[in-house]
């Protein structure tokens, strides 16, 4: 049993806390934020030794410090938290998991590191105490302006294609794709990014030493090898569980500047990611799909509920995360006659290709005045839309023609 | 040349105005609203005879009537309007088109008729002066709470199927489907409604005597024969033109309680219907489709721009037009463990089917306290999710199992 003694430095204390608590434990987060990780750890050891719940702010002995930036959790919450933490204390080993991580070239990031992604602080006390990272460790730079592309495991060919193409397009725009490494949409998104040489970040629900699901191990290792990273909040060695999956989703939402759901069934983990992102006031996009496809029902639900904005291509997604500064490219499918004044358009409608009509007939057909008809015909003749023949006017054979 | 003389009764005068003006002529609408149709007609005849622009409110001769409910158009607008109306006056024949209509069993509806759909009044001066109707003439009753299902001519199999099924479902809910009788989505919608015996209303851009497009003539006649109606603002004999198509769209939007766009390209007439509906504060829905389909691009644009709400099935559409009173049926896909408290769910995650674990091991794995673990195990045992064996606890073989 190593290290179940005092820990002086912040990083090691955070490793210890990471080993002790489950992801999203807001009591631990608040305690560490209020006291600092080493002091919080010392407090824990006192609690373990005494069987009591010491006041974390020293209010047992003296009036507590005034003006604490972060409120420490109340006594009753601490007592309940100790009940769930202390069973893990015996045998807790800080060194071995760190060794495993370091042997894999990984690093344990903590708040304050230049590489620490500051947006995680938006999670408040539920922010991770530290991150287990393999691959490129400049996580802050890599995830700035990044996009989470997430979705169903049970994806369709359509969904996988869209996820792949979106991620590839984002990589072309030097935008990192963050996802969960799962089968289906996640994997397609990572693949799309890698295909264009983009760095991609895989956020796992289990330890970074075990690429899960095993079927995606090669893909996940490729993310590490190709300039991206694999990230987890739980220590190496831990298996993914349902609650860890759900907490992992909040991490994806917090890491990325915006979240896009490509395919999701009516109930899907990807929806939890979307709701986490919305809760963090991050923009959320949903890719629509056929209403006949259950794999898109969750996306449509997000659109209906106003949680997500409809996104259909890379420019929509970039507008989502960067704001409307990036102009979506509007297909300029101008149609013949679009630019004409109303009465000229009506004359164009009224004119025939087969049979020439005089000005009066055209004015009556079109419901415009004779003056308007004459003016319009002059303009249309200049544009080559109508031609004057002996009997009057008719549509030019090469002109824009009638649109009905 | 008949009837280019004074007309005493409102209905006949409105027929004359309908023959004289193009749909959506707000000057004519304002004039008829301010003076009444016969007086407006008399004014027109005076203008034609004198070559002047008489003051419609008699302000030439005497102080004008006080407290006119509707403001008559200004002198300059009237002069321009006369320029476009007068060319049509010679030869204007009220009787013949009415004869054609009556021989087809049709009726010319005017505001004030019990069958006149009052929602058309929302169009203000651009409201039609009258409606040419074939089939069931109780248009007010038939269109109350109706849904416009519109979309692209160049529809896909997907879009046509969705339009058909939506319309069929609406017919089952005794909701009239209104559309434009065009190829593609419109036709599929009419067909879906007819397939379930629902009345359907076809709003044409040309006269009701000529079912256009000719390829849909049988379908349009079926709408008449099967308890529905064919409606137009332009007189019998008129051909559809581009501006008439656009004005027809405003009529569809105004007739229906809500508009649903099933498929529409980036630029599509169906979008104009949607925008007309939105402008009239009628609810608008758009059916999403694959982002890879150009036929859905217009729908996605409506969703993105916030013009339309995402609708995927009949209950979504009913909620759109009737309000949230109609509850969308939510698939109750409860998953095992959903109803459990958080710590019980974590214990379920931590337990194994193959290997039994004691309470302490489960608590450590799950990151919960011993008390919580014991309590959770008792609850899970009662639910048959876990079973107690000699070495401790394991997942019951028939239980809900672990969800990852």
Image: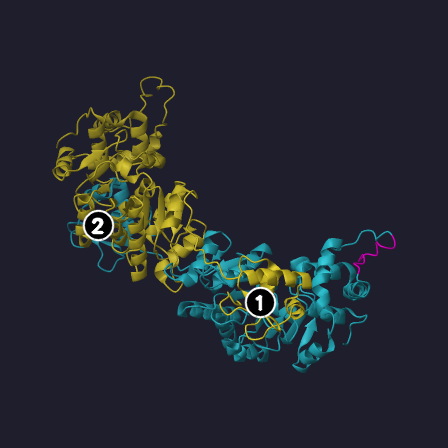
Chain colours: A cyan, B yellow
Q: CA distance from mark 2 to mark 1?
A: 75 Å
Q: Quadrant of residue A101?
A: bottom right
Front in this rendered view, residue B325 or B381: B381
The overriding secondary structure of the stretch rendered in magenta is loop
Looking at the image, residue A265 lies above or below residue B105: below
Looking at the image, residue A196 lies above or below residue B109: below
Q: Is residue A195 left or right of residue B300?
A: right
- How crowded pointer 1 is (Cα within 10 Å; few <14, some 14-19, many 20+) is rated as many
Residue A71, how many percent across, how many down? 75, 53
The residue lying at 80 percent from left, 70 percent from top is A7
Query: From which residue to which does the magenta span run?
Result: A52-62
Residue A368, how many percent across, how many down? 26, 41
Front in this rendered view, residue A129 or B270: A129
Q: Quadrant of residue B367?
A: bottom right
**Badge 1 is on which residue?**
B349
* Residue A351 circle label: 2
Instruction: Find out whether residue A318 is within the magenta segment.
Output: no
Residue B238 seen in render? no
Q: Residue furthest front?
A: B390
The residue lying at 21 percent from left, 29 percent from top is B11
Quadrant that contains the N terminus of chain B = top left
Q: Is residue A140 left or right of residue B307?
A: right
Numbered disc 2: secondary structure: loop
């Amino acid at each position: 049993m190593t290290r179940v003694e005092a820990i002086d430095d912040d990083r090691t204390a955070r490793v210890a806390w990471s080993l002790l608590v489950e992801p999203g434990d807001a009591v631990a987060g608040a305690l560490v934020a209020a006291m600092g990780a080493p002091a919080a750890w010392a407090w824990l050891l006192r609690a373990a030794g005494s069987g009591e719940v010491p006041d974390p702010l020293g209010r047992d002995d003296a009036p507590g410090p005034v003006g604490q930036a972060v409120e420490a959790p109340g006594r009753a919450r601490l007592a309940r938290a100790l009940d769930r933490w202390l069973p893990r204390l015996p045998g807790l080993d800080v060194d071995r998991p760190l060794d495993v991580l370091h042997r894999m070239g990984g690093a344990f990031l903590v708040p304050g590191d230049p590489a620490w992604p500051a947006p995680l602080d938006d999670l408040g006390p539920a922010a991770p105490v530290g991150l287990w990272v393999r691959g490129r460790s400049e996580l802050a730079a890599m995830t700035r302006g990044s996009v989470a592309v997430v979705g169903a495991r049970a994806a369709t060919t359509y969904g996988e294609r869209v996820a792949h193409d979106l991620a590839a397009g984002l990589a072309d725009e030097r935008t990192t794709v963050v996802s969960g490494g799962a089968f289906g949409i996640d994997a397609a998104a990572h693949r799309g990014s890698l295909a264009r040489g983009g760095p991609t970040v895989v956020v796992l629900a289990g330890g970074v030493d075990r690429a899960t699901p095993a079927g995606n191990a090669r893909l996940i290792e490729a993310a590490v090898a190709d300039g991206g990273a694999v990230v987890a909040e739980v220590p190496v060695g831990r298996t993914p569980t349902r609650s860890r999956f759900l907490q992992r989703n909040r991490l994806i939402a917090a890491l990325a500047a915006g979240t896009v759901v490509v395919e999701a069934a009516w109930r899907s983990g990807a929806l939890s990611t979307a709701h986490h992102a919305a809760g963090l006031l991050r923009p959320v996009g949903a890719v629509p799909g056929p209403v006949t496809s259950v794999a898109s029902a969750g996306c449509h639900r997000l659109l209906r509920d106003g949680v997500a904005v409809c996104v259909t291509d890379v420019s929509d997604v970039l507008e989502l995360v960067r704001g409307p500064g990036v102009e979506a490219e509007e297909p300029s499918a101008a149609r013949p006659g679009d630019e004409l004044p109303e009465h000229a358009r009506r004359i164009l409608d009224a004119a025939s290709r087969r049979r020439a009509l005089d000005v009066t007939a055209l004015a009556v057909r079109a419901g415009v005045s004779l003056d308007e008809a004459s003016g319009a015909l002059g303009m249309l003749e200049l544009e080559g839309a109508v031609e004057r023949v002996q009997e009057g006017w008719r549509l030019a054979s090469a002109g824009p023609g009638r649109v009905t």
